[in-house]
Amino acid sequence: MSVFRSGVLVLTSPLSALSVRLAPILASAAKIVQDTLYVHLQPGLLLTGSSQPSSTCIPATNEVCKLISKLYSDADVHSNLDVRVLLTNIKNQSNSQQIFSSVQNLSHPPEVVLTDFQTSDGGQYNPAKQQLERYATNCYSCHPNLISILLYPDYEQADYCNPEELDSGGTLLQCHSDVVVGGTFDRLHSAHKILLSICGLLSDRRLLIGVADHELLDNKILKELIEPYEKRVNKLSQFLVDVKPSLIYNIVPISDPYGPSITDPDLKCIVVSEETRKGGLSVNRIRLENGLEELDVHEIELVTDPQHSKIEEEKISSSSLRNRLLGTLLKAPTVNRSIPSWPYIIGLTGGSGSGKSSIAKRLEVLGAALIDCDKLGHQSYRPGGPAYQLVIDEFGSDILCPDGTIDRKAISSKVFGNKDQLKRLTDIVWPAIAALAKEAIEEAATKGMPVCVMDAAVLLEAGWDNMVHEIWTVIIPEKEAVVRIMNRDGVTEDSAKNRLSSQMSNNERVAASNVVLCTLWDPEITQIQCSPCWFRDDKTDVRPAGCSSPLVLKSTHHHPLGTHGVTTVLYCYKPFDLYINVSSHLADFN
């Protein structure tokens, strides 16, 4: 159980040994620190001498870059940790003699200082701990009540090191005054940190960072879940100032692939990855056309993601992280005191062609009572329905078929392209649908149904969000939605695009949602998405409004499709005190 929110880990092992020791060291640290873990490399530091040790410079070599990359990669398994390797004492060629001139401020002052240094007795040797505390406070701004811990990780056979994994030559990095790099930097992850760290080591004056925005985001997977530009920049700024505060950081939005890299005359180097190498070459071509010097192109390797699924990229990427948000609780539902707490109502919405109805059917299989608002709309128009006579009175008897039913095509022709006419219609029909939906909910309650899914394309536009406990939105890229609408309804591409443009955007829906789903992939992938949002365990600390604390059983069921185990949760729904074993519906996936 982690007990400190932030800490600094001082690594004293030789660099050649650290590569294979990192995993057990980080595993030990993750049990103590729960949020931010700063890492300070100081190989050979002695904490048992008579004199107080001081920080010394480490040359910025390819070996050090590989070690930093491995450190971030190994830390990925500890999802609770925000690891930040501090670069202040790692120097490139131009300033290799500089050392700490003052205490460096950190955005999260460490509450604990950890080390891999070991004493001969294998205990928490007080003089060594005191030396460690003084060393940490001489380098960084720490919490006033700083605690020190000697980790003694379980290395087992970790002392073995494959020489081929390290750059034995220790080639120094060539430094540059001004370096440029670009990216989306969504949900700052370990691959971003590796990229930015190498940029920091290459630069000795300024780092220019172009952050993708606007048009550059249009073709991104699940672009609706990309963090806002301001949030991405804030995370970037905090990380960069923490790891190397001596640099000047210029962070700018870019809406084309090049940004200022083709116009800034002071730039000397551009950092790219294997997949953006061609972009770096294009930058140099355009710079030459603009009468500017070519940039040195420094290429870094992509970082493999061992946890990637079959629909995700093999590399660590933001798109994979966004994919893993699907079906999870993005924000806790607010308590809706205007409706009964039982049954629990999920409002399911999405644009035309999103696959919302297929999700609704899956949730019905899982045990939900399905309320199809589109069918209720048809019902409201029928003779004797709540909207029937009101619509005739408003739009005239010429909308009637010979059999007395309302001709929906005739109504559509009257309101198409006319916002005022459309509002006159929705002011009649939407309240009628809401009344029918309430009747369906009451009927479900009398049948003992604990959960209802209100399937409504206009859930938010109609204001029906005040009828539900939480909102789930189904999204799909516009290009895919257009294809689906054309195939399903036999309409032209322009007609499909016009239909989508007249609806609420995915971004607007997602902003109001508690859960987001996407039907872009095969049906079994959608099926897996439904699991985490339906079967919530106690770790989310979120339960339907009006429910008592869930009773969590120790047994774990495994999803038939091979997903992670799902903890059985028993919710006690008030006021009926009915216990519902929601995990029993797992069998319905077969």
Image (cartoon, rainbow, N blue to C red):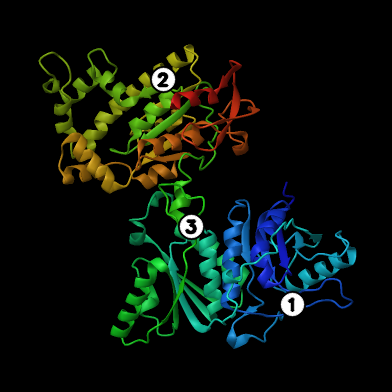
Disc nearer the start of the sequence (2/3): 3
- Distance between mark 3 and mark 1 Cα atoms: 33 Å
Any mark on residue 438, and which? 2
Question: In the image, which is nearer the foreground, mark 3 or mark 1?
Answer: 3
Question: In the image, which is nearer the foreground, mark 2 or mark 3?
Answer: 3
Q: Which residue sits at x=64%, y=70%?
A: 86
Residue picked out by circle 3: 316
Residue picked out by circle 1: 55
Question: In the image, which is nearer the foreground, mark 1 or mark 2?
Answer: 1
Disc nearer the start of the sequence (1/2): 1
Q: Residues within 10 Å of mark 2 (few under 14, many from 20)?
A: few
Q: Secondary structure at mark 1?
A: loop
Q: Which residue sits at x=89%, y=76%?
A: 50
Disc nearer the start of the sequence (3/1): 1
Q: Tell me which corner region of the image, top left, top right, bottom left or bottom right, holds residue 471.
A: top left
Label 1 amino acid?
Ser
From the viewer's perspective, tell me whether residue 197 is left or right of residue 134.
left
Q: Is residue 243 visible?
A: yes
Q: Residues within 10 Å of mark 1 (few under 14, many from 20)?
A: some
Task: Residue 491 in the image: state x and y as whole percent.
Answer: 15, 39
- Distance between mark 2 and mark 3 Cα atoms: 46 Å
Q: Is residue 551 above or below residue 62?
A: above
- Distance between mark 1 and mark 2 Cα atoms: 69 Å
From the viewer's perspective, tell me whether residue 564 is left or right of residue 346.
right
**For this rendering, which residue is in front, 195 or 344?**
195
Task: Residue 346 in the image: state x and y as whole percent.
Answer: 45, 29
On-image quarter of the C terminus? top left
Label 2 amino acid?
Lys
